[in-house]
């Protein structure tokens, strides 16, 4: 570590950053207008640079050598399927083998001070969270990725955008703030989650300060909708122009329609992760999600890491094209989606697209031979006005020895004591059993009973697997 201070504003060639990763509005006339052949050339150049970065790190060198690869074996992006995928479990192992940051980073604790670095984490409900270091490029590009989505959905300079994500070790709130403040000329209102700023106050601030757009989970928008109804707050009085959100599995569009009706504004779905930023976003036409192809190479793969054809549902495998601190090459998100071919959208942007989210591979439960994704229950439960929309799938063993079976109980909160428990349970049991293709049981609980799981953080938990205990 030198004595010189690595000033952040000098750590980047800002003109080059903007040219390499165009923010709005230039994105639409540059990268967003590239043909499939042009974007492939750009992706290949960046992919090979990231391969050079990764071979220098023990994590990748160890994994790739074990798979029989040597430096130089991967000659282009066309060879990427020769590289084994990895997932968050492998990152946890990397951190445990070389604490506290793991051997997949190019910087160790003793290197801090040479360049601007930021610590962000993912996971950590139990034990230490999973650490990812961000350098200036990783930090700014994630803001640009998000700014592209917000701009496509209607954000313009001068807009007030409310961000009910806490700017903490989790990354989502920072991505939003960076996009809004640095790359859009909009005004961020960083209220934090409902635990930091109660929902009633969130609505008061939105009215007083003229909030035009929101950046938050669909679940929390639903919570704000409920609070508004309870306190007699008319959401249509707000000058809301767009709702940037993460809908999760909403295949029938029930959650989106309910939110749009309640807020009187369009709801846009987006997809990203802590490690690689905003991968894809919807434009105003809402016909699947545009991929930020200059920052991420996406594959849809089966459980063995083999690529699936266009339109088939599999696990999202991401190779970050901008991150060298650290590189992410064939990182299996274990999110179930489909990808569609590169083409020009009605909005003018040319890109491949991602479908809606179907569920999580690692949340999948095999119940008597049937694969069940807990998040697939969301649409049916949320559109039933007798519920709060909150639910938790609980899987456990029933019986002993050869008679032992797996059973799933879905706990669902009723909205009030006036709701008939038995009628709601019977209706949801019939609907969900038919939709999931397996016999399940619905247990009705009181409003707030599931807060420990659904409101313990900004991302609700939908599966409690007691078989692992």
Image: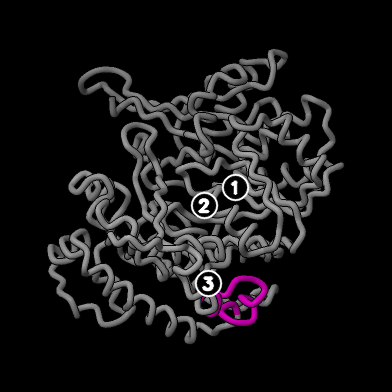
Q: CA distance from mark 2 to mark 1?
A: 8 Å
Q: Main secondary structure of the magenta part?
A: helix
Element assignment for label 1: loop
Of residue 257 and residue 297, the one placed in the foreground of this image is 297
- Residue 467 vs 218, above or below: the answer is above
Q: Is residue 255 above or below residue 201?
A: below
Q: Residues in magenta?
A: 18-32
Q: Residue furthest toward the top?
A: 417
- Which quadrant is home to the N terminus? bottom left
Quarter of the view holding residue 426: top right
* Residue 267 shows in this picture: yes
Query: Relative to residue 143, is residue 264 drawn left or right?
Result: right
Ranked by sequence position, the earlier of labels 2 and 3 is 3
Q: Residue tagged by mark 1?
A: 247
Tell me what residue is drawn at x 36 percent, y 44 percent. 362
- Based on the picture, tell me whether residue 30 belongs to the magenta stretch: yes
Helix, strand, or loop for circle 3? strand
Q: Which residue is mark 2?
A: 357
Quadrant where the image shows the C terminus? top left
Q: Position of residue 166 (x, y in %)?
A: 56, 40
- Residue at the spot of label 3: 352
| 89 left or right, relative to 297 | left
> Is there CB contact under 8 Å for labels 2 and 1?
yes
Asked which colour scheme the image uses, the reply is: one colour
The numbered mark, 2 or 1, whose residue comes first in the sequence reads: 1
Are the residues flagged by discs 1 and 3 in contact, CB closer than 8 Å?
A: no
């Amino acid at each position: 570590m030198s004595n010189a201070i690595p000033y952040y504003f000098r750590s980047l060639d800002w003109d080059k950053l903007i040219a390499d990763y165009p923010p709005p509005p230039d994105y639409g006339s540059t990268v967003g207008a590239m043909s499939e052949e042009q974007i492939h050339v750009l992706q290949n150049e960046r992919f090979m640079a990231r391969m050079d970065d990764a071979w220098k790190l023990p994590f990748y060198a160890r994994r790739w050598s074990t798979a029989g690869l040597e430096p130089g074996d991967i000659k282009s992006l066309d060879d990427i399927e020769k590289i084994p995928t990895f997932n968050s479990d492998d990152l946890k192992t990397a951190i445990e083998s070389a604490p506290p940051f793991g051997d997949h980073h190019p910087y160790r604790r003793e290197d801090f001070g040479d360049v601007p670095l930021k610590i962000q984490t993912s996971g950590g409900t139990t034990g230490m969270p999973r650490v990812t270091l961000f350098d200036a490029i990783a930090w700014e590009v994630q803001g640009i990725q998000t700014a592209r989505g917000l701009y496509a959905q209607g954000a313009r300079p001068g807009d007030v955008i409310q961000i009910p994500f806490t700017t903490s070790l989790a990354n989502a709130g920072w991505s939003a703030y960076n996009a809004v403040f640095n790359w859009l000329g909009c005004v961020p209102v960083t209220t934090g989650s409902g635990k930091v700023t109660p929902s009633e106050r969130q609505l008061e601030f939105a009215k007083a300060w003229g909030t035009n757009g929101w950046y938050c989970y669909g679940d929390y928008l639903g919570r704000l909708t409920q609070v508004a109804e309870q306190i007699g707050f008319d959401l249509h009085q707000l000058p809301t122009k767009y709702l940037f959100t993460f809908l999760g599995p909403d295949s029938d569009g029930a959650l989106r329609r309910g939110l749009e009706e309640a807020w009187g504004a369009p709801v846009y779905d987006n997809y990203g992760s802590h490690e690689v930023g905003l991968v894809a976003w919807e434009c105003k036409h809402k016909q699947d999600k545009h991929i930020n192809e200059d920052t991420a190479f996406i594959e849809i793969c089966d459980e063995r890491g083999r690529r699936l054809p266009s339109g088939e549902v599999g696990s999202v495998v991401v190779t970050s094209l901008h991150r060298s601190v650290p590189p992410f090459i064939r990182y299996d998100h274990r999110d179930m989606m489909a990808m569609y071919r590169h083409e020009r959208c009605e909005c003018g942007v040319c890109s491949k697209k991602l479908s809606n989210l179907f569920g999580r591979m690692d949340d999948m439960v095999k119940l008597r031979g049937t694969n069940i994704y807990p998040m697939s229950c969301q649409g049916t439960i949320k559109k039933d006005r007798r519920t709060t929309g909150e639910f938790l799938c609980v899987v456990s063993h029933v019986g002993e020895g050869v008679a032992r079976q797996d059973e799933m109980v879905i706990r669902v909160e009723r909205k009030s004591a006036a709701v008939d428990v038995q009628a709601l349970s019977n209706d949801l049991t019939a609907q969900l059993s038919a939709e999931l293709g397996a016999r399940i049981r619905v247990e009705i609980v009181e409003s707030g009973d599931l807060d420990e799981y659904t409101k313990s953080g900004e991302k609700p938990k939908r599966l409690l697997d007691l078989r692992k205990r």
